[in-house]
Image: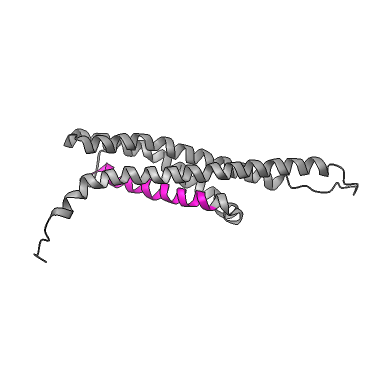
Amino acid sequence: MPDFVGGLPLHPLVVHFVVVLLVIAVGGAVLIAVWPAVRRRYGWLVVVAAGVGTALVPITTNSGEFLESRIGTNPGIQEHARLGDLLVWWALGLFVAVTALMVLHQRGEKAQPEPAEDGSGGGTMVATRQASGTKVAVLVAAVVTVGLAVATGVHTFRVGDAGARLVWEFVEDTPPANGG
């Protein structure tokens, strides 16, 4: 993998993909957890966003380590790197949660009770119990998904905030170039 793209370090380029995909995954995860119609329509897209975002985290951290080796380190860089190294676990947890939610949702859609073909009602009780159990599992998965989405969103913000402060914090104390 190249360390530079177009003369720029890879890290600030790829980090934007991670941030965008994880923010989409976080927002989408909350929506699919609380809104079944959105889950039916966009749930698998949220899984893809979470999966690709998660897969890009190690590329981003590796490119950050390369950049650190080029510019040196300080406590701010060390904190940014420490937080960045933890992000993969939050993102992976979110990916697993949204995937489980979608699998359980699909299972629940298939487990809807149907009357027996002979009209006797046979089998309805078992199908109803299965559908009820699946609904509980979907509810639990939805709660876990929302919790992991919030945690992943907060951690993504913390990583990005630490990195942005390293690059941009000096601007606040810099007077305007044109004196205005």
Q: Is residue 81 left or right of residue 56?
A: left
Quarter of the picture holding the N terminus: top left
Residue in the foreground of this view, choosing between 66 and 136: 136
Residue at the spot 37% in from the left edge and 44% down from the top edge: 156
Q: Is residue 67 visible?
A: no
Most distant residue in the left direction: 179
Question: Is residue 5 placed above or below 70 in the rendered structure?
Answer: below
Quarter of the picture holding the C terminus: bottom left
Residue at the spot 46% in from the left edge and 47% down from the top edge: 49
Q: How is the image coloured?
A: one colour
- Relative image position of residue 57 (x, y in whole percent): 37, 39
Residue at the spot 23% in from the left edge and 38% down from the top edge: 76
Q: How many marks?
A: 0
Q: Is residue 75 visible?
A: yes
Asked where in the image residue 72 lies, by quadrant, the reply is: top left
Principal SS element in the magenta part? Answer: helix
Q: Is residue 177 left or right of residue 141?
A: left
Most distant residue in the bottom direction: 180
> Which span of residues is magenta-colored?
7-31
Any magenta on residue 19?
yes
- Relative image position of residue 39 (x, y in whole percent): 58, 52
- Relative image position of residue 146 (x, y in whole percent): 51, 46
Q: Is residue 29 left or right of residue 19?
A: right
- Relative image position of residue 137 (x, y in whole percent): 64, 40
Any magenta on residue 77?
no
